[in-house]
Every structure is written in structure tokens, then in C-alpha cells.
Amino acid sequence: MKKLKIITWILLLLNCAVCFADDIKPGTKPKIIFREDWGARPALSDISQYKYDGKQSPTKIVLHNTALGAKSGKDAVKEIQNFHMDNDHWSDIGYNFLIDYSGTIYEGRYLYYVPSHAGQTKEANGTHDLTKDPDYNTIGIAFLGSSDQPWSAAQEQSAIQLINYFLTVYPKIEKIMTHAEVRQDILSSGLTPVGDFDSNICPGSATAKNIKTIKDCIIWSLRNKT
Ligand SMILES: [Zn+2]
């Protein structure tokens, strides 16, 4: 019994070390590669329909896995933007931020537009009411990876730093969710999701430990220190 207690304490201490390792400073703005620096294509003009009426006020952060492999670098981010614009025919890349396998953070869709990452609802599409869109007032963060592989430690650390920074600037953020959890939320709130979704795919069960670490290292008290 005593041995178990000691092991628990060691694990707790190790967990703290994970949260504050190296240059992770709670609440400070992490280095972000902005659109112009990774060579993003300009969004199509019809993105204007997704502009928030007033200032955006994110309440949720949604975590995703991309499906194009555990890659790093600007070209990998461009590949995702091209896929969203050319294959999916979206106005721009869907995610607000992307974290490559080496832990580098990239700016995706500008935060003043409703992003496109957690699906659609029949209600939002039918009435053009963006407030019924699951992406409304969310920040979508995508991890470059594949569904059967965990995220790297560098991705984990960058996500912790990025989310802790968001807590200092967006006081209404109250939840960190996975794409699969958003899907459940849509169903339980009486809205009708559009399209098929396999909850095992995004973010994928291999990332469960990463998500737990990220959630354990979120410093919710930071929202009072803007
Ligand atoms: Zn997803």
C-alpha cells in the first residue's frame, strides 16, 4: 500500500515536470508561424459569409487529428490547406491552428471567421444561422498525425502552451473537447449532424494519453490574469 502511494507521488511529480518542462511558461504567447510566413493561399472572397457578427468570443477548444500523416514543415500545412480548398471546396483551411509533428504552431483560418472543423448541422445549413453551427465560437486545433499514432511530446507541449495562452485572452473558454465529443454534443443538444462520422478516427484512440496530459496541464486560473 505504501509502495503504491510512493509510485503515485512519483507519477504526480513526473506529470508536473511534463507540464512545465523547458520553455513552457504558463500564459505567455507561444511562437506561431503566421499565414504570410508559411505561404498560405488567400481565402476565397466568399469567406466573408463566415465573419462573426461582432467580435468572436470562443467558448470551446476542439482538438483534431489530420489524416495526412505525422509530418512537419510549411509544405505539410500547405497540403492541408490545398486539400480543404481544392478537395472539400471550402473557402479556406478549416482549422484555426495546426501543430506539426516537430511541435511548430501554424496559424490557420483567421479567428474572426467561423472555422470549419467540427462538422455541420442541418439546422445551420437550412437557416444560414451560424450560431447553430458546431464550429461557432470554437477554436479548432489540428495535430498533424494519423489516427493510429500518438502525438509527439513536442506537439503535446506546444498545445499546452497555446491553450494556456488562449485562456489569458479569451475569458469565455470553458471546455477542451475532441472532435468526437463535439459530435456527441450536437446529438444531445437536439441538432442534426450532417454526414457520417467515425468517432474512432478523430482524434483517434492512440492520442487518448496525449489528450489527458494536455487537459491535466491546462491552467484554468490563468483566465483571471489577462
Ligand atoms: Zn476532426
Image (tube, rainbow, N blue to C red):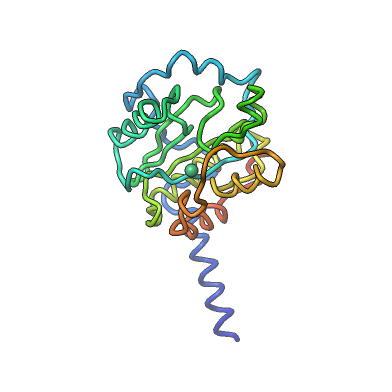
- List the single residue furthest toward the top: 45
Q: Is residue 146 above or below residue 94?
A: below
Q: Is residue 155 above or below residue 95?
A: below
Along the line of sight, the residue nearer the viewer: 126 or 210: 126
Along the line of sight, the residue nearer the viewer: 177 or 26: 177
Q: Quadrant of the N terminus?
A: bottom right
Along the line of sight, the residue nearer the viewer: 133 or 206: 133
Quadrant for residue 106, please give it. Answer: top left
Label total for image:
0
User: x, y percentage for residue 146?
Assistant: 37, 50
Residue for point 53% across, 39% down: 195
Q: Is residue 191 above or below residue 177?
A: above
Residue for point 59% across, 45% down: 183
Residue for point 56% across, 26% down: 114
User: x, y percentage for residue 71?
Assistant: 30, 44
Residue for point 55% across, 78% down: 6
User: x, y percentage for residue 172?
Assistant: 68, 36
- List the single residue furthest toward the bottom: 1
Q: Quadrant of the C terminus?
A: top right
Quadrant for residue 37, please give it. Answer: top left
User: x, y percentage for residue 167?
Assistant: 60, 39
Quadrant for residue 143, please give it. Answer: top left
